[in-house]
Every structure is written in structure tokens, then in C-alpha cells.
Amino acid sequence: KNKKIGTQGYCMGGPIAFRTAAAVPGRVGAVASFHGGGLVTDQASSPHVQASKTKAQFLIAIAANDDQRAPTEKDVLKETFAKAGLPAEIEVYAGSAHGWCPPDSGVYNEPQAEKAWSRLLALYGKALA
């Protein structure tokens, strides 16, 4: 219990990772979301609102086609983390489609998946050390 943990989610797991960090802010030091769905909503319980309750560092890897569908979400996320004073890497992964990370996905993008994995390892290395 003396060490921080990291949590990560893919698609709808992204919001779950955010909520986990908000539920136990003293334990979660790193949160990652890959092609996360529903990170920004107009609800008071929106995952992006929950993020301000955490003490974690964040990695948010956005699929290019998700960004095309909701181009302002990354800006809302950036503003949320800036206001909360939380470190966050938020990036749209060029040429990626929703679901690009798992190797068994029909839209798997190996170069971008490897980039996302390396960013996750870097996050965990600094936030959980």
C-alpha cells in the first residue's frame, strides 16, 4: 500500500481507469486511456470531471477517427488537466482508427500501437517510480 499503482483502459476501459483514479486518489499514480470512449460528456459524473479528483499523471492516446468525430474533446481534456494542475500527455495518433492498439483488432496499427506502448512504459516509469 506504500506504492502507487497504474491503471489503463482501452475503449470503454478508459473512463473506468479515470474513475478508478478518482475513487482512490492516494493509490493511483498513473492513468492511461487508449482510444477511450466517453471521456468527455455533459454529465457531472463525466470521466474528465472525475480526473480533477485525482493525483495521477495521465496518458490519453486518441484515435484519429475518434478525433474527427469529436474534435473538441482533446481541447476539453487539455483544459481540464491544466486547471487541475495534473500532468497529462494528450495526443491524437495519426493514421489510427478506434481500436488500433490490440494486435487482434481489425484496425491494428503496429507502429502507432508500439508508440502508445512505449509512452505507457514511460508514464509508468516516471509516475510509479
Image (cartoon, rainbow, N blue to C red):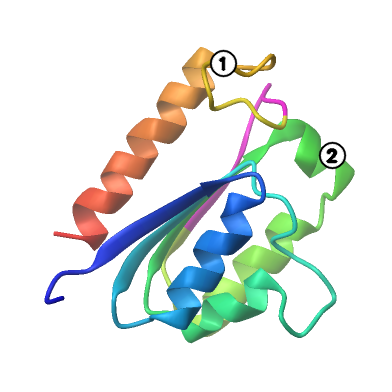
Considering only vertical position in the picture, is 25 above or below 102?
below
Q: How far is the residue under mark 2 from the one under mark 1?
A: 24 Å
Q: Are marks 2 and 1 in contact (CB under 8 Å)?
A: no
Determine whether the residue tagged by mark 2 lies in a helix, strand or loop.
helix
| Image x and y of residue 37, in percent | 72, 50
The residue that label 1 is drawn on is 104
Where residue 38 sits, quadrant-wise, is bottom right
Residue drawn 67% across and 25% down? 96
The first of marks 2 and 1 along the sequence is 2
| Image x and y of residue 89, in percent | 47, 54
Residue nearest the viewer, comparing 19 with 32: 19
Residue drawn 27% across and 63% down? 5
Magenta includes 82? no
Q: How crowded is mark 2: few (under 14 residues within 10 Å), some or many (20 or more)?
A: few
Q: Quadrant of the C terminus?
A: bottom left
**Dot label at residue 68:** 2
Q: What residue type is labelled 1?
A: Asp
Considering only vertical position in the picture, is 68 above or below 19?
above
Image side of residue 35 versus residue 124, left or right: right
Highlighted range, magenta: 89-97
